Amino acid sequence: MARRAGWLLLVWLVCASVQATVPEIPRFRLLGAGDGLPSTTIPALARDRSGYLWMATWDGLARYDGVGFKVWRHDPADPASLPGNVVQALHIDAADRVWVGTENGGLSVMEADRGGFRHFRQADHPQMGSDDVFAITSRGSDVWFGTFGGGLHRLSADGRITRFSASADAGSGLPSDNVLSLAFDARGVLWIGTMDGLARYDGRDVRRFALPHSQDAIVYSVTADGNAVWVGASDGVHRWSPQQRWVSPPWSAMFARPNALIAMASDGQGEYWLASQGGLWRTDGDLAPAPVNYDAQNVGIGRVLQTVLALPDGGLWVPVPTRGLAYLRSDWRRIAAFSPAQGLGGGLYRGISQAGADGVWIASSTGKVERLDTRRGHVTPLPHHAALLGELRLTSVLQDRHGQLWIGHRNGLIRTDPRTGAMVQWTQQGEHAVPDGTSIDWLVEAADDTLWLVTQMGSVQQRDARSGRVLRTIAKDDEATGLPDIEGIAVAPDGRLWLGGAEGMRVWDAAAARFVPVPAMGSERVYAFAFEHADRLWLHRMSGVEAWRRDAAGWVRERRIGADEGLPAVESTGLAVDPQRRVWLGTRRGLFRIDPNLRGSRALLRNFGVREGLLSQELNDRGLLMTADGLLATTAADGSVALLDTHLPDPKPVTPNLVVDSLQVSRGDSLVHMRVDQPLQLQPGDHELLVGTRLLSYENPLGNRYRSLLEGFDGGWVDQGASGERVFSALTPGRYRLRMQAFDAAGNASREQVLQLHVLPPWWRSPWGLLLFAVLGLLALAMAGAAYRRRVRRRSAWQLAEHKREVAEQASLAKTRFLATLGHEIRTPMTGVLGMTELLQSTPLDERQKGYTDAIQRAGTHLLRLVNDALDLAKIEAGKLELQQVEFDLHALLDDVAALMGPVAGKRGLAFHHGIAAGVPRRVRGDPLRLRQILLNLLGNAIKFTEAGHVSLQAVTLAPEGVRLTVGDSGPGINAEQQARLFRRFEQAEGAQTTARYGGSGLGLAICQELAVAMGGRIDVDSAPGKGTRFSVDLPALRAFPDAQATFTKEAAPVAPAREVGALDILLVEDDTTVADVVAGLLRARGHRVTHAPHGLAALTEITAATFDIAFLDLDLPGLDGMALAQQMRQRGLDTPLVALTARTDAEAEPRARAAGFDDFVRKPVTGDMLAAVIASHERGARAVGD
């Protein structure tokens, strides 16, 4: 028996040594109006199937998802909104429907799709006794609700409402129609709390149920607890036990009115949270409940709490009247945070040291030294020397193995005995003074019963722990033994002293009496270090936390945990290793716990900050202490101190619930909200799809992490960080599968949520649209083929037409060239023919010979006229007919034509009439030569075809402007068929008959019409057989010019016989001997002296040997042509008139000849009269030269 007791004692001692519990100080996280809470008055809390937190408030119904609130309120324009904003009852049934009761608004329900409310009011349901619903509960498909003044009601699944009212019968019916609370126990019995007592419904009827001490006490709450029921009444708290009897706890009377119990919740471990008229309380069921200060100002004490809600994971939600809604983490017992509200003296605590088995010493910047009981949470100031210490700025504290307390400050060192108050001081002067005059930051006790201290400047001093005398000082500025910046000092388990700082790690070498570097660990700055055991050292650098192992060869790095495993690159304030061999790193971003997994797998990291229970996560330098029993103490920048139980296991792994909270898409100019419980289908043109998810884990919502993968779009999981929302700007048509997952702050993973997404294509990419496009494509191909064939045909036709046009142009050009060449070649021999004929006519001839020569002369002239007509026609066809635009006297031109043709008409016995109407302009602009050609041709035809009667030439004005010239005759006339052929080429009125009788080629009228058209006019014929013919030449382009205009061109009359001039010396340059003989003969016949040169060189020789009065030069000479010859003559100073004599017919010939130096231009063939006229026009110049 004694042996068994010994073992039990040993087990108890082991467990006690393992468990390092800390004082229980609940630390709540508060949500208020700034977080979106609509009201701080919260009568009820509930949790739905997904894990959302619902709250009834006095300004609407609110739902919290860990990030924000969604609020439902009354909207007069929406009948599906709440009846009012003061919500006083809330319940969520097994079907996930939300039931609420508003002040005098009846009962309202919102289905699981959260679309809107249906209402049950007394006006629509007369079975209801009141619209003031105070309590709601449910079982199965039935919903029960209690009203104030209207009794109890059951709402069946079919919509029928059954009412239960108060009864005068002492045993049956409700004690009162004012129902305050409802609850079903594990057996299915409904417990009913009223203003006048308790009742139960067992499935058959409602019966009153007496309380242990009072029959008619006010029952504020009934709470089912397994097989038991807790009742909060005006006379206290009572418990109906599973043994079917009343049990009143010893503290029942504490919760009698005015501190009546209104709500309670179990934490699942035998403890209860009590919400009363006096605030929040906590009890394990046997001990008296203790009030809970759920904010730093204790404002909850004395405030009425109407509800409390415990979550399955151990978390707790509690309303804080006038402040908001508070949340307590499930692992709240891990950390106990102390501030002045828990008894701290205040100031910044930089010194911390273990104080026995169950306490720590803390020293503040305000001179306070306090002992914090780590078991009970009591804070006890050092009982001695408060006035002296209060004037010092304390920076370090250490309790040695003898119980003496060493205190470092800015001006020196103090040793005191906490029990007796005995004290010794050392300052910067005197015997055993502290070094370098700066604050003492580190105090450590070595195994050899010595004390080592480190100053802010980096000096190190060793003292005897019993006497305090100085044994050794290593000054900062000592060249031989001086040290770099020091970040930490510690004694290893083997007793050796280590330093960490700016140049890595150093260890005390007693033989050399100095700290020597550890080369294997490098020279990178070490911010903090701690020994796990004698052969494993942990140290922290900016690059991460490193584990070093010592073996026979020395120190070897085993592991580095850095940013790639989630540890931020941050300066540390301290490092410690707990009994579970986990590393704790203090930083200004909170505490990091590192489970290193030295076997090589990824380290497990967890951060502890304000959301985990710390009052501040900015930890002080040197403010980290691991006690022997595994309790971690920290000090923070806000003056708080925290105790953390490293033995307390983490909450059991859970699977937090991830919900799809919202789906919305931009459609046109509007935002469309889509249901989350149905497959998602997007219309063509939809964009900016927003998928909102929420991980319903309330421990640390900001620490939740989200990721998603859209199959068919993403290449891998997309990390969304702390945001549960993801936006897809535009998705191509198709089917997608969106996978979503989240992790809570502890690393627990949710189940994947999968959303099927179908993006509809635009109609033109739908199957029917593609089919339509295929059909249209085939039609388009067919039409394109047809169009291509038509295009090929048109192109072929166009190419054929172009070919014909080119062939025609080439033929026309060839014809023009041929006619020009032919004309040139004909004019040269015609000069011989006509010239010789003229010379022959000047000799004595008999009548027969004279007839022969006249016939030759007529035939030659006719041939020359045919050639000229053909050349004109060729120019017109080639578009090379050039018209002059000069001013001339129209009246004079008409008079000249009449003077020329009148005698011809007279010879045929015809009368010739000539008239110019009033208004016909005198001065006009145009081509007088071509106009003369038209008139002479028309008058010639009129005279030729008229055998008797008259021929006339009339000129009248043409409206609105221009001139009409009319040639009329009294000839045989022309019928319509003949008129249609009249202006065709090589056509005459009666065809071959006309040609045989009158001669002609049939080109004259065709050329006249072409010339008239070129002048901007036309020729019309008006005739009938037997009535003569009238040709009208309409020329709108002949516009009048004012008389004040400058001089105008006077068209020369036909060549008339020139007056005789004296004999001249004439040079004739002609390569054709026949032409030369003709021209020379014609000139000699008129008495001139002619010198003939057959080519240009001969002509140059002649002008140097003799003087000539005038020279006739052929243009087409062999070797040196006429143009070059004229230039040579002018260059030699010859100013004799030069006349070009050529057979060329092109329009460019004359301008070029004049530019070359010629004074006149004559085309072959020539006559004596033509030559005489030319000589006469240059007679004055010739005489001057001859003189």
Image: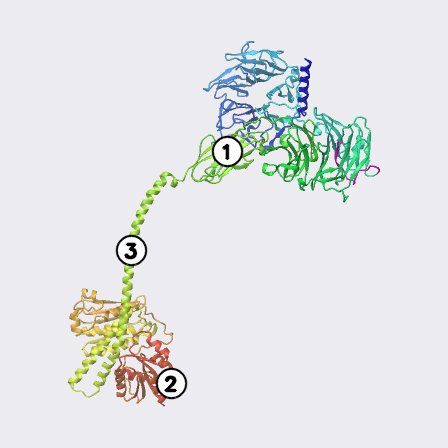
Q: Quadrant of the C terminus?
A: bottom left
Q: Residues within 10 Å of mark 2 (few under 14, many from 20)?
A: some
Residue position marked by numbered label 1 in the rendering: 740
Q: Residues within 10 Å of mark 3 (few under 14, many from 20)?
A: few
- The question of residue 31 being in magenta is answered with no
Vertical arrangement, residue 817 with respect to residue 1073, above or below: above
Residue furthest to the bottom: 1187
**What's the mark number on residue 468?**
none
Q: Position of residue 545 (x, y in %)?
A: 64, 36
User: Earlier along the polypeptide chain: callout 2 or callout 1?
Assistant: 1
Amino acid type for the residue under numbered disc 3: Arg
The reply, left or right, for residue 853 in relation to residue 514 is left
Q: Position of residue 477 (x, y in %)?
A: 77, 44
Vertical arrangement, residue 514 with respect to residue 277, above or below: below
Residue nearest the observer in this picture, 684 or 503:
503
Quarter assignment of residue 561 = top right
Separation of marks 2 and 3 at Cα, in angstroms = 65 Å
State the extent of the magenta-drawn residues as a range. Answer: 430-447
Amino acid type for the residue under numbered disc 2: Leu
Residue nearest the observer in this picture, 77 or 215:
215
Vertical arrangement, residue 869 with respect to residue 332, above or below: below
The reply, left or right, for residue 457 in relation to residue 1088 is right
Residue position marked by numbered label 3 in the rendering: 794
Residue position marked by numbered label 2 in the rendering: 1134
| Residue for point 35% across, 86% down | 1101
